[in-house]
Image (tube, rainbow, N blue to C red):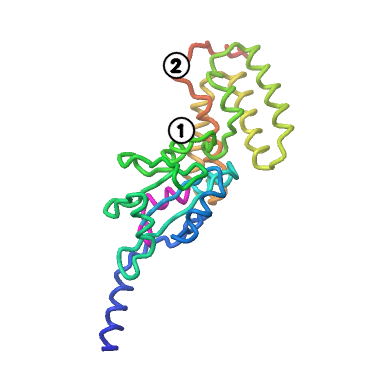
């Protein structure tokens, strides 16, 4: 009997995918006892109901979202609930409470300070980093933008490439003052990138946007550290803020030598 049990355990271990991601960085694991008390301590909570040991692109997207959300706000709990349909059926009752389809994991819910007040991510929406950000932004006042982006800067820079030179210079002065008031080192660095791009677009015109984008993409594709890749990605995200559907402003004339 013991021999059979050992054999079954060995088979089970070998059948586990090597890509299984047991943890989700920044996520809180909830169960039937802790769920309601924990969710109701936060203004907002996003909870992923999934198999007990999730893996794959959807889990990775949720993990990436967790990292971004922690940088952006303290008012959002990011949590997971592992549901088992075997053994002691851990958290199955909790899944049943929210009519979680265990044949279509994961199910993602956004709670608004109350375990009975929630919105579910529609099943037809892919679980991606951008879709999770959009889901939270559409249903809460929280802003979780692309890494590197600053909400206040984004809001005033819409159509920046097309506004008159005098207005561009005025915005540069205003955001320079805001940048000096920032206390977080990473936010200060990101704000400096905004200001550099603002000045370049003012001086060179919209063509700078595409040229700089291609330059950063080439660097990112090269042999650089993960930290450098993240820095380049933040700069690419900031550049996208300046992109417009149609350029209506004439580029500055180049001075003849």
Q: Up-down: is 172 above or below 3?
A: above
Q: Is residue 60 magenta?
A: yes
How would you rate the neighbour count of disc 2 (Cα within 10 Å): few for under 14, some for 14-19, many for 20 or more? Answer: few
Q: Up-down: is 132 above or below 244?
A: below
Residue placed under numbered mark 2 in the picture: 246
Choose mark 2 or mark 1, whichever is in front: 1
Residue 168 sits in quarter: top right
Q: Position of residue 56 (x, y in %)?
A: 36, 54
Q: Are the residues flagged by discs 2 and 1 in contact, CB closer than 8 Å?
A: no
Tag 1 secondary structure? helix
* Separation (CA) of disc 2 from disc 1: 26 Å
Residue 191 sits in quarter: top right
Tag 2 secondary structure? loop
Q: Residue furthest front?
A: 116
Q: Position of residue 165 (x, y in %)?
A: 62, 12
> At 52% across and 10% down in the image, what residue appears?
250
> At 74% across and 32% down in the image, what residue appears?
180
- In the rendered image, the quadrant that contains the C terminus is top right
Residue placed under numbered mark 1 in the picture: 138
Q: Magenta segment range? A: 51-64
Q: Position of residue 181 (x, y in %)?
A: 73, 33
> At 46% across and 60% down in the image, what residue appears?
23
């Amino acid at each position: 009997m013991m021999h059979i049990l050992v054999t079954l355990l060995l088979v089970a271990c070998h059948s586990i995918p090597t890509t299984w991601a047991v943890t989700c960085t920044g996520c809180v694991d909830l169960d039937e006892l802790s769920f309601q008390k924990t969710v109701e301590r936060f203004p907002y909570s996003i909870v992923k109901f999934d198999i007990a040991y999730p893996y794959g692109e959807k889990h990775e997207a949720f993990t990436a979202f967790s990292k971004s959300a922690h940088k952006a706000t303290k008012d959002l709990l990011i949590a997971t609930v592992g549901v088992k349909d075997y053994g002691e059926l851990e958290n199955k009752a909790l899944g049943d409470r929210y009519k979680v389809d265990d044949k279509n994991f994961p199910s993602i819910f956004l709670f608004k300070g109350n375990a009975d007040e929630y919105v579910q991510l529609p099943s037809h929406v892919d679980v991606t980093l951008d879709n999770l950000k959009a889901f939270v932004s559409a249903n809460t006042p929280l802003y979780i933008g692309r890494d590197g982006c600053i909400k206040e800067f984004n809001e005033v820079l819409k159509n920046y490439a097309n506004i008159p030179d005098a207005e561009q210079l005025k915005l540069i002065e205003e955001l320079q003052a805001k940048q000096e008031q920032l206390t977080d080192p990473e936010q200060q660095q990101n704000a400096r990138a905004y200001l550099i791009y603002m000045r370049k677009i003012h001086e060179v015109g919209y063509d700078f946007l595409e040229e700089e984008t291609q330059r950063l993409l080439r660097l990112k594709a090269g042999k650089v550290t993960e930290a450098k890749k993240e820095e380049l990605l933040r700069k690419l995200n900031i550049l996208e803020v300046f992109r417009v559907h149609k350029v209506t402003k004439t580029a500055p004339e180049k001075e003849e030598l």
